[in-house]
Image (tube, grey):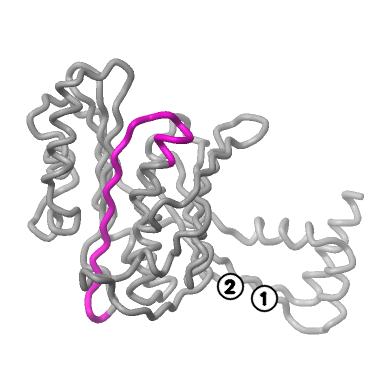
C-alpha cells in the first residue's frame, strides 16, 4: 500500500501533501511491463494524480491527469479517486532512449515538450471541470506546478521521483506538493523557497529511509505544522464486466451484429489493468437484445 499525508501550517497559510507511492508504482510497472524510462514518466504522473485525487473534497469525486508532449511514449493518463487510489495507462509501454546529460532516465525525452497537460475533475457538476496548460518541461513535476499556477491560480511547488532498479522493478517512488494559501506571509514564503532550493530529491529521501511524514516535514522545515490526515493508497482499477457490457452496447447495433456474426469470441482488454473480458457470440446477441430494448 502507498501512503499519503497532509499537513497545514499552524497559521493556515500553506499546505503540504506528501506520498510514498513505491508500492503503487510497483504495481503499475508489474501490470504494464513498461521500460525504465516509461516507468519513471508514468510513475511520476501517477504519483501526482494520486496526490491531486487526495486533495478532492467528496467521496464520489475523481480526477484525470493526461499529458502528451509529442514524445515517443505518446499519451499518458492517470485517474485517481478522492482517496488517492489510482490507475494509469500509457500508449507506448516500451521506449528505449539514451540517458540524459545528467546520466539519468530521460523522462523529458520520452514525454516530449510540444503538447498539453489536461486535468479533468469530475466533482458532481453537470459538466466536468477541464483545465489545460502547455507543457513547460516534460519532466511532469514542473508541468503540474505550472498547471496549478496558471489554471487554478494557486502558487505551488511539486516534486516527484521514481527510482528504477536495473531489473526494471521500482525501487522507490513518491512526491510532494506545497501550496500557498491566501494571505500567506512573506516570511513563510521565504522559508519554503529556501527549503525547496536545498531539499534532496524525493527518491534520495526515500532511499535514506524517509517516510511520507518525514518528507512533508522536511519540505516545511522551520515552520510549525498541524497534521490534517493520512490515508493508504493502492493501484486500483474500477473496471468490471458490467462496465464492459455497457461499453459494448454503446458501440451500436451494427457493431454488435458484426461481432455476433463472426462466430468468434470477442475479447475486450482494460487499458488500465490489462484484465481481459471475453464474450461468446451468444452473449453478444444478448447484448443486442438489451440494446434494442433501449431504442
Asked if the magenta segment contains residue 91, the reply would be no
Q: CA distance from mark 2 to mark 1?
A: 6 Å
Quarter of the figure that contains the N terminus: bottom left
Q: Residue at x 58, y 35 (%)?
A: 129
Q: Is residue 97 above or below residue 1?
A: below
At label 2, counting other C-alpha atoms closer than 10 Å, the crowd grade (few under 14, some 14-19, many 20 or more) is few
| Image location (x, y in percent) of residue 232 | 30, 46
Q: Which residue is mark 2?
A: 276
Mark 2–mark 1 contact, CB under 8 Å? yes
| Image location (x, y in percent) of residue 100 | 28, 71
Q: Residue at x 35, y 66 (%)?
A: 107
Q: Nearer the viewer, residue 270 or 131?
A: 131
Q: Residue at x 25, y 26 (%)?
A: 14
Q: Going from the N terminus, do you reach mark 2 or mark 1 first?
A: 1
Q: Residue at x 52, y 65 (%)?
A: 70
Asked if the magenta segment contains residue 158, the reply would be yes
Q: Magenta segment range?
A: 147-167
Q: Which mark is residue 267?
A: 1
| Image location (x, y in percent) of residue 223 | 11, 27
| Image location (x, y in percent) of residue 83 | 39, 41
The secondary structure type at the circle numbered 2 is: strand
Of all residues, the one furthest to the bottom in this rendering is 263
Quarter of the figure with residue 82: top left
Q: Which mark is residue 120?
A: none
Amino acid at each position: 500500500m502507498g501512503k499519503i499525508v497532509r499537513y497545514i501550517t499552524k497559521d493556515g497559510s500553506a499546505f503540504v501533501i506528501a506520498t510514498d507511492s513505491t508500492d503503487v508504482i510497483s504495481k503499475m510497472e508489474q501490470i504494464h511491463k513498461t521500460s525504465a524510462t516509461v516507468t519513471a514518466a508514468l510513475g511520476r504522473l501517477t504519483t501526482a494524480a494520486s496526490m491531486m485525487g487526495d486533495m478532492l473534497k467528496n467521496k464520489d469525486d475523481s480526477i484525470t491527469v493526461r499529458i502528451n508532449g509529442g514524445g515517443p511514449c505518446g499519451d499518458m493518463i492517470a485517474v485517481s479517486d478522492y482517496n488517492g487510489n489510482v490507475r494509469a495507462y500509457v500508449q507506448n509501454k516500451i521506449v528505449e532512449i539514451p540517458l540524459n546529460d545528467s546520466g539519468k532516465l530521460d523522462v523529458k525525452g520520452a514525454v516530449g515538450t510540444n503538447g498539453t497537460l489536461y486535468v479533468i475533475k469530475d466533482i458532481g457538476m453537470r459538466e466536468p471541470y477541464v483545465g489545460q496548460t502547455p507543457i513547460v518541461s516534460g519532466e511532469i513535476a514542473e508541468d503540474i506546478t505550472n498547471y496549478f499556477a496558471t489554471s487554478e491560480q494557486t502558487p505551488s511547488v511539486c516534486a516527484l521521483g521514481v527510482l528504477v532498479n536495473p531489473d526494471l522493478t521500482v525501487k522507490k517512488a513518491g512526491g510532494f506538493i506545497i501550496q500557498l494559501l491566501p494571505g500567506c506571509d512573506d516570511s513563510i514564503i521565504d522559508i519554503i523557497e529556501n527549503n525547496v532550493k536545498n531539499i534532496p530529491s524525493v527518491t534520495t529521501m526515500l532511499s535514506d529511509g524517509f517516510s511520507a511524514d518525514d518528507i512533508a516535514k522536511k519540505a516545511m522545515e522551520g515552520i510549525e505544522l498541524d497534521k490534517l490526515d493520512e490515508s493508504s493508497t493502492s493501484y486500483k482499477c474500477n473496471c468490471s464486466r458490467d462496465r464492459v457490457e455497457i461499453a459494448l452496447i454503446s458501440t451500436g447495433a451494427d457493431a454488435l451484429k458484426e461481432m455476433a456474426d463472426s462466430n468468434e469470441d470477442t475479447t475486450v482488454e482494460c487499458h488500465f489493468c490489462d484484465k481481459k473480458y471475453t464474450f461468446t457470440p451468444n452473449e453478444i446477441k444478448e447484448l443486442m437484445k438489451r440494446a434494442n430494448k433501449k431504442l
